[in-house]
Amino acid sequence: MSAPQEAPQPAAADDGPKITRTDCDRCGTRVSGIDGRYACGVCGWVNHWSEGHRPLPPAEADVDYPGPGAAPRRRR
Ligand SMILES: [Zn+2]
């Protein structure tokens, strides 16, 4: 790879999710995540949700949100 260049980035990208990287806590594989949340595709490790860089969106933000009072969906 060549030397990193200072590419002009739109300032609007500042408030969106960011891709972050870390080493898997369990197997050491380099994993990418969003806003500090990771899931390793090799060993299945995930980091704790509280390690994310921003709060999780509320249930209401989910496109599948069934509305208040709806029973939680069962996992298959
Ligand atoms: Zn792993």
Image (spheres, grey):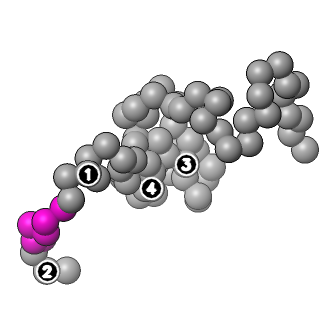
User: Regarding mark 2 in the picture, which secondary structure is present there?
Assistant: loop
**Is disc 4 in contact with disc 3, using a CB cutoff of under 8 Å?**
yes
- Using the rendered image of the protein, determine whether residue 28 is visible from the camera's viewpoint: no
The residue type indicated by label 1 comes to Ala
Most foreground residue, 9 or 37:
9
Which quadrant is the N terminus positioned in? bottom left
Q: Earlier in the sequence, mark 1 or mark 2?
A: 2
- Judging by the rendered image, the residue that carries numbered circle 1 is 12
Relative horizontal placement of residue 66, taking residue 49 as reference (left or right): right
Residue for point 10% across, 71% down: 5
In the image, 76: left or right of 62?
Answer: right
Instruction: Calculate the distance from the C-alpha at mark 2 to the C-alpha at mark 4.
Output: 22 Å
**Separation (CA) of disc 1 from disc 2:** 27 Å
Please give the residue where the numbered disc 2 appears in the rendered image.
2
Q: Which region of the structure is painted magenta?
A: 4-9
Within-10-Å neighbours for mark 4: few <14, some 14–19, many 20+: some
- Asked whether the residues under the numbered discs 1 and 4 touch, taking CB atoms below 8 Å apart as contact, a structural biologist would say no
Image location of residue 25, percent across then percent down: 46, 42
Q: Is residue 75 above or below residue 49?
A: below
**Disc 3 to disc 2, how far (Cα)?**
29 Å
Q: Please give the residue where the numbered disc 3 appears in the rendered image.
A: 39
